[in-house]
Amino acid sequence: MSDCWKGRCLCGAVQYHARGAALAQLICHCRDCQRASGSAGLPVVVVSAAGFSFEGEIRSYTITGGSGMPTTRNSCARCGSLLFGTPQHAPDIVTLYAGTLDEPSRFRAQFVQFTCERHRLDAREPGVEQYSGRAP
């Protein structure tokens, strides 16, 4: 049985489907991913473009990515959720942003890249209080 990765934006106006196994799963800490996601790093599932489709209206933005090559980030035109990337230097892949997966627990990072640009934004350090729900 082949994998099917499904996800959607915050408002549900855009859904995506990717057939086939993940080609890679990673967390990227490049400054481009930090700025695009507003977080310390961006968890990414790399899938084949041939098995990828989406429904709904997206807004695309192209910028030079951490690779030094143009990459296009695609967001919901309605709510602005960052959904997937289409790197121009690798037109045979699509990068799904794992926070938008219907089943985010399937994400298993195989590696982390651009650690030289990692910042202390994620607060997963000893001595920083952690709460499983909302902080009191």
Image (cartoon, rainbow, N blue to C red):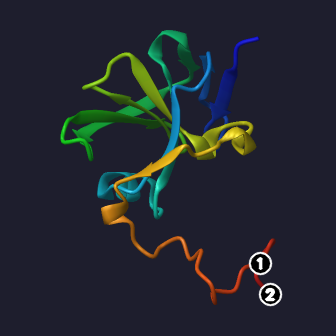
Closer to viewer: mark 2 or mark 1: 1
Vertical comparison of 115 with 113: above or below: below
- Nearest the viewer among 19 and 102 is 19
Q: For residue 25, what is the image quadrant?
A: top right
Describe residue 3's horizontal placement relative to residue 52 as left or right.
right
Identity of the residue drawn at 74% across and 38% down: 103
- Nearest the viewer among 63 and 79 is 63
Q: Identify the mark nearer the N-term, 2 or 1.
A: 1
Q: Identify the mark at residue 31; answer none if there is no mark.
A: none
Identity of the residue drawn at 45% across and 76% down: 120
Q: Residues within 10 Å of mark 2 (few under 14, many from 20)?
A: few
Describe residue 22's horizontal placement relative to residue 2 as left or right.
left
Residue at the outermost front position? 110
Describe residue 44's horizontal placement relative to residue 3 as left or right.
left
Q: For residue 86, what is the image quadrant?
A: top left
Where residue 56 appears, as percent x and y from the top left, is 56, 23
Residue that badge 1 annotates: 131
Vertical comparison of 97 with 115: above or below: above
Residue that badge 2 annotates: 136
Vertical comparison of 30 with 16: above or below: below
**Amino acid bearing label 2:** Pro
**Amino acid bearing label 1:** Tyr
Q: Could you tell me if residue 40 is visible in this image?
A: yes
Q: Secondary structure at mark 1?
A: loop
Identity of the residue drawn at 57% across and 46% down: 109
Asked if labels 1 and 2 touch by Cβ distance under 8 angstroms, the answer is: yes
Where residue 135 appears, as percent x and y from the top left, is 76, 82
Q: Secondary structure at mark 2?
A: loop
Where residue 122 appears, as percent x and y from the top left, is 53, 70
